[in-house]
Amino acid sequence: MGRGIEVVAGFATNPGATLTTLTPSTNTSFTIRGTDTSKNAWLLSGWGFNATAGEFVVKSPRLHDNVQGIRNRVTAAFVAPLFNTPFNPMARQKLFAQDNLTVQISGGGAELDCGAILVYYEDLAGIAGRFIDYPTIVKSGINLVTAEVTVTAVATGNFGGAVAINSTFDTLKANTDYAILGGMTDTRGTAVGITGVDLGNLRLGFPAEPSLRDTTNNWFVGLANAIGLPAIPVINSTNKSAITIDVETNGAGGTYIVNLTLLEMAQGSVGATGL
Amino acid sequence: MTQQLQPQEDFPKGHPARFDYDPHSPEAVEWKRRNIHPKGERDFPVDHPKAVDTKGNTNHLPVRAGVDPLNPHLEAFTGAQPEVAEARRQAHALLAQEQNETPMKPEGFVDTAAVAEKSALDFLMKQGHDEEAAREILAREGIDQVLAAKATLGAEG
């Protein structure tokens, strides 16, 4: 199965009261990947990062409606999931291959306002992310360890500052699988992105909200339980120099200390393509 | 063409093992600042933006939900300036005084009939009728007709 999870984040410059379509971060798109409409894709969650309160809209003619769709209030300076919170049993919003989602935000008149959505692909051609479910964590998890990195974000509204997972400390055991349970950040931003060959080279991520550390630190475990699908990414330490962490944030930029919570997995417990 | 060779130094300037080491030289003082940590291993390197002894670090700023750490004077969750937030509070207080409580039935349920009747009366009065005339129209046409007209016109309330 070619599973993949992708966080797509974007920004709007000085949207003010106007619902403004987000400009996706460089080389990303709010168009759902794939061409086979029989393969399931799910809208896992979405959130906004505003300095001034606004509205965050996700809509498409192929979702409920193309008028207001999934419209929610974004409170200022608080990057929390606005729908489908991973720590509640989650409804599944089906997405369709090649559907161009309209993602809009309103907010302040002199700032970058940002938003992000998280998409789950059950079987995406050419993608082979390694994902497992919660029972596998319980059965084959050995040791908890954290990977701390320093990411200096850019102020353009795009993802930036990518560093390797071992850029600060290089302590992962050789040729060992690690499940990424979630992570924490000390500074507010739109999203923390994690990219790597084990993840199908898609950027997955979680909200960069330092006051919801209990939520983001088990983000992928929550997702897996909430949606009932393997959603906990697994990386192999062999690829550590090519597993990168970056951050998307508003025009303030910032330096982010990101802690990823990893779980060392028993040798051979996770297949080459996960579950 | 002769190859340009970059001279490689055995130790950087200021390093104690360097041939011209002077403990009081600016290079030596800087080397010491960067590399000697008498209290033990540091959490972050010298000059790292999050190191507590880096000038301008923001480690002391609390990160509260809904508050911009760099602008804590702004209202939480709205980002509004204090004077704007105060004006909004006053406007909301005035609105609150004009609001009615939700009509309830003695059994503890919301009196939805009363809510609908008030909505219909408000709609008729917004169309220019006084309260007496509005009640008369409501009695004559029935609440369903009035609310249907309200829905057709897309009236608020």
Image (tube, helix red, strand yellow):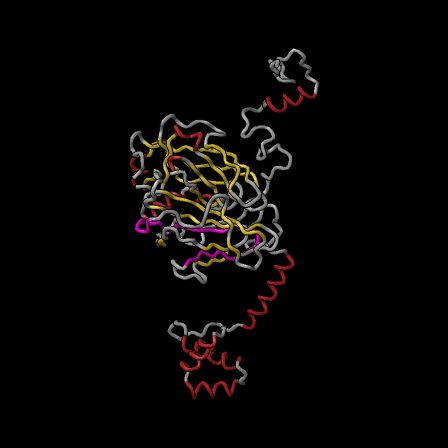
Q: What stretch is highlighted in magenta?
A: A36-60
Residue at 56 percent across and 28 percent down: it is: B45
Residue A133 at x, y percent in the picture:
32, 42
Q: In this view, does A238 lie to the left or right of B97?
A: left
Nearer to me, A252 or B49? A252
Residue extending furthest front? Answer: B1
Regarding residue B135, the answer to whether it shows in the image is yes
Q: Is residue A235 left or right of residue B49?
A: left
In the image, residue A86 lies in the stretch drawn in magenta: no
Regarding residue A226, the answer to whether it shows in the image is no
Vertical comparison of A48 with A154: above or below: below
| Numbered-mark total | 0
Residue B52 falls in image quadrant: top right
Residue A244 at x, y percent in the picture:
46, 35
Residue B23 falls in image quadrant: top right
Split into 4 quadrants, where in the image is the C terminus of chain A? top left
Q: Is the magenta stretch mostly helix, strand or loop?
A: strand
Nearer to me, B41 or B136? B136
Nearer to me, A77 or A156? A156
Residue B30 at x, y percent in the picture:
65, 23
Residue at 41 percent across and 44 percent down: it is: A6
Split into 4 quadrants, where in the image is the N terminus of chain A? top left
In the image, residue A40 lies in the stretch drawn in magenta: yes
Residue extending furthest top? Answer: B19
Nearer to me, A193 or A183? A193
Residue A194 falls in image quadrant: top left
